[in-house]
């Protein structure tokens, strides 16, 4: 079964810090995604990548950047964390072949910015 | 742009009772529709999906959903709820490259009374 692993379950950072959220998938999926989950707002797409070194902005990319140097790893970067970035962050992956509509999610990283 | 509305933020049902979770979408063409479930502390798991054909789709864990174009709805149903169904449920709509740009609803949290 596909496994999507997010490096931290909980993170506490200070305003202005640079924050890295790491995500690794083990099924050779082409597509990887970063979502942010907030109560009542559901999931909102921050960035996605359909290939190594390729990235596309989602609905709320402001204040974030991403890096995909290897196929299995997709990093979300908060250049200067702010309190309004306190949220649950979910990574997901999918194949680019038949069945690509199914996203496989990690367990999430709850980030608190103080 | 597509959008998804889940009108019920919280729903409580008794174990063994039937369940219907509402989902309304806005999209100009035939949508790709999904229901995902998130158990506490977990990522999201795909329950079922609709692309075309039979408007009543069956999913995992005994869930089904019906696509009604005239009502722009894709409601999720289960005839008899189990305590393990307590979770948060997300409806999502995709367009074009299904799975690449999903728009999620705000979610419905289901609680099950013994």
Image (tube, coloured by chain):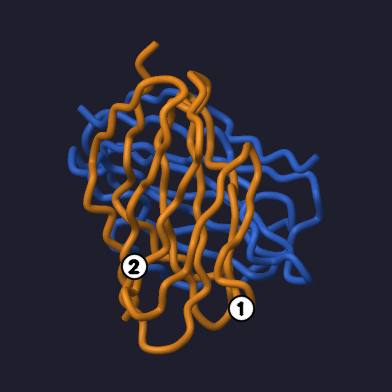
Task: Answer left or right for A86 relative to B110.
Answer: left
Q: Is residue B46 above or below residue B85?
A: below
Residue matched to label 2: A59
Q: Quadrant of residue B114?
A: top left
Q: Going 31% across and 81% down the picture, which residue do you hit?
A: B1
Q: Secondary structure at mark 1?
A: loop
| Viewer-nearest residue: B109 or A62 | B109
- Residue A3 in percent (x, y) is at 72, 39
Cα distance between the residues tagged 1 and 2 = 26 Å
| Viewer-nearest residue: A1 or B73 | B73
Q: Quadrant of residue A4?
A: top right
User: In the rendered image, is residue A46 in sight?
Assistant: no
Q: Is residue B88 above or below residue B71?
A: above
Mark 1 and mark 2 in contact? Answer it, CB < 8 Å: no
Q: Chain of mark 2?
A: A
Task: Answer left or right for A54 relative to B90.
Answer: right
- Closer mark to the observer between disc 1 and disc 2: 1
Q: Quadrant of residue B28?
A: bottom left
Task: Answer left or right for A49 relative to B108.
Answer: right
- Residue A12 in percent (x, y) is at 33, 24
Q: Which chain is orange?
A: B
The quadrant of the picture occupied by the C terminus of chain A is top left
Q: Chain of mark 1?
A: B
Q: Secondary structure at mark 2?
A: loop
Q: How many marks?
A: 2
Badge 2, how many Cα within 10 Å: few under 14, some, many 20+?
few
Task: Answer left or right for A93 relative to A83.
Answer: right
- Residue A80 in percent (x, y) is at 28, 46
- Residue B59 in percent (x, y) is at 63, 50
Q: Going 52% across and 60% down the picture, which residue do you hit?
A: B34
Q: Going 55% across and 49% down the picture, which residue do you hit?
A: A75
Residue matched to label 1: B52
């Amino acid at each position: 079964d596909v496994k999507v692993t997010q490096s931290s379950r909980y993170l506490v950072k200070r305003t202005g810090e640079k924050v890295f959220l790491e995500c690794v998938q083990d099924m050779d999926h082409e597509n990887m995604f970063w979502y942010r989950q907030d109560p009542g707002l559901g999931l909102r797409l921050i960035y996605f990548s359909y290939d190594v070194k390729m990235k596309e902005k989602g609905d709320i990319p402001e204040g974030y950047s991403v890096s995909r140097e290897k196929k299995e790893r997709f990093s979300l970067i908060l250049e200067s964390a702010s309190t309004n970035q306190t949220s649950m962050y979910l990574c997901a992956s999918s194949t680019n072949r038949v069945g690509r509509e199914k996203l496989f999610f990690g367990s999430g990283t709850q980030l608190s910015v103080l | 742009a597509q959008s998804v509305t889940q009108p019920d933020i919280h729903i409580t049902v008794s174990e063994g009772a039937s369940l219907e979770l509402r989902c309304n979408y806005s999209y100009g063409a035939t949508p790709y529709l999904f229901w995902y479930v998130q158990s506490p502390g977990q990522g999201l798991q795909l329950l079922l999906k609709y692309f075309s054909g039979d408007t009543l789709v069956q999913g995992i864990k005994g869930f089904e959903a019906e696509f009604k174009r005239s009502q722009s709805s894709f409601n999720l149903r289960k005839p008899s709820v189990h305590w393990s169904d307590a979770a948060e449920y997300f409806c999502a709509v995709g367009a074009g490259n299904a799975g690449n740009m999903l728009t999620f609803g705000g979610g419905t949290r289901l609680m099950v009374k013994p």
